[in-house]
Amino acid sequence: MHTRSRSADSDAPYQSLSTRVPTSLEEPTPAAAIQADAPVEEYEDGVPVMPPLVSPRIRWIHFVLGCAVLLPWNVMITATPFFLARVKGSSVQNLFSSYLSVSFTLSNFSFLAHATASTKTTSPARTVQWATLNIASLNFLLTLSTFFTPPAGLFAAFVLLSGIAMAAAGSYLQTSVVAVASLFGPSVMQSVMSGQAAVAIVISAVQLLSATASVHTTDDLLVAAAESDAAAERSARVFFALSTLFLFCAAAANAWMTRMSAYKAVVHEPKTQRRAWTRRLSQSLGEERAFFEESEHVTVPDTKDRILEVARRNVIYEVAVAYVFVVTLSVYPPITISVRPVSPTFNPLIFSSMHFLLFNVGDFAGRYLCSFPLLLIWSSKRLLALSLARTLFIPLFLACNVNAGAPTLVNSDFLFFAILFAFGLSNGYVSSLCMMSAPSLEHNPRLKGRREDVDIAATVVSFCLVGGLVLGSVASFGVKATMCRCNPFVG
């Protein structure tokens, strides 16, 4: 028998399970006690059959964790002007940003494969804590590096190795955060995606402010170049230090969340509660048999087989989200940072800083649009079409001022920034929709109502996202060859 109860207290859904069970399962809740805006809980056999409602605290903490997930990548690419200043004159100068992108994303992809396969065997809370603190330590080392000037080759090796180590730790952080967020539903997943874009805005804004405050106009080109390099160094030092502090705060927020009863109820859900939830779901879908029988002899498929099966069913979503980042990483930042201002009054350092900020603002705006129901697209085929359409941005960027002295079709700084903003907007919008749709029981019929596959679907589509980053980084060499008509591996 089903009993529906409501609570006017916003914290009620997060009390212990024993306090939420009605005193009498035979007697329905009086109509007078029902309020229009009160959260709803379903019960069957004395246990909730639907997961607890999502607290704003859960969404905000996942927003912070989303920031932490993408912080390592944004730190590395936003600090590109500083890295390029330190390797100036070396053999890797022209291709350093491409090598950085490839090494970071390839490491992220490799470790993410292991993290995805071990989703069910590791504790997400401990993984998040371990990964966050490790990334914070690496950021602290990068902060220290701004006070020394080692040989260009040694510095390049240090940056690449730091990026690889951060990508490795970030792989486990990303998998754990996405897996937990998927259990809370699309709204929490959207918070994670928005957090990833928000941190990029903050970092690039800090970089722009630091660069603007540090740059001084001069007619001496050598002095101007030296001042630009010094400004890049000071800017990098500020956001490396702020990133370190933020990661320690994210670790504290995660520790707080794991002590919440809502987190325990969803992530460490008892077997009887999970079985009741699934039985209720199967009945609502009109199925004759529950996915989990009362018999204890029911076997669950091997985790690897389940991962492959879920990946096969969600292949359209996975291709769509991967191709979004294939296009993005093929030009951003290796090609877009090569665009020079048309106006002679535009300082190159400020121009590149504004370029990062505008892309990140557009990316965040695209992810924020996914919080409006009227703008949501759940169809896998439509999302794939939108993803493929972003290919048009590649020739648009190549038509900008990427080759000094060569004729350009886009001969306007404002138009370049407008294209860049649209590029970021589409990146955030389409990728967030894919990440929200793939693990959604309500909107993805390919999951067939199997809640036990929700976190697997989320981690697999997240893995494909990183796969797109890897392919896009490799593709950037081909795009650069088209741009400069040269061997892209030697500049």
Image (tube, rainbow, N blue to C red):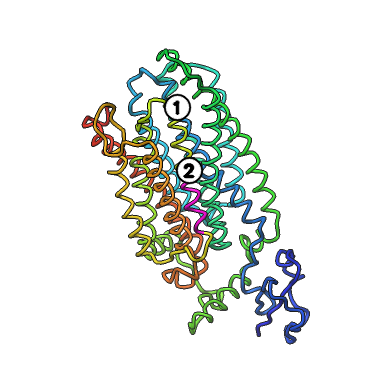
Q: Quadrant of residue 341?
A: top left
Q: Residue at x 35, y 55 (%)?
A: 387
Q: Position of residue 272 (x, y in %)?
A: 63, 72
At horizontal 59% and vertical 73% (from top left) the residue drawn is 277
Q: Nearer the viewer, residue 434 or 262?
A: 434
In the image, taking residue 70 as reference, residue 64 lies left or right, namely right
Q: Is residue 368 magenta?
A: yes
Which residue in the protein does label 1 denote? Answer: 349
Q: CA distance from mark 2 to mark 1?
A: 17 Å
Residue 253 rendering spot, x and y as whole percentages: 66, 47
Q: Is residue 309 magenta?
A: no
Q: Which mark is residue 360?
A: 2
Q: In front: 394, or 474?
A: 394
The image quadrant where one finds the C terminus is: top left
Identified at 24% across, 31% down, the residue is 484
Whether residue 168 sits left or right of residue 33 in the image: it is left
Residue 309: give its label: none
Q: In x, y percent, where is residue 75? A: 50, 35
**Magenta stretch, residue numbers:** 360-370
Instruction: In the rendered view, tell whether residue 162 sits above or below residue 314.
Output: above
The amino acid beneath tag 1 is Leu
346 or 261: nearer the viewer: 346
Q: Is residue 381 left or right of residue 370?
A: left
* Image vertical order of residue 417 relative to residue 156, above or below: below
Residue 247, position in %: x, y? Answer: 61, 39
Looking at the rendered structure, the kind of residue marked 2 is Asn
- Identify the residue shown where x is 40% and y is 66%: 379
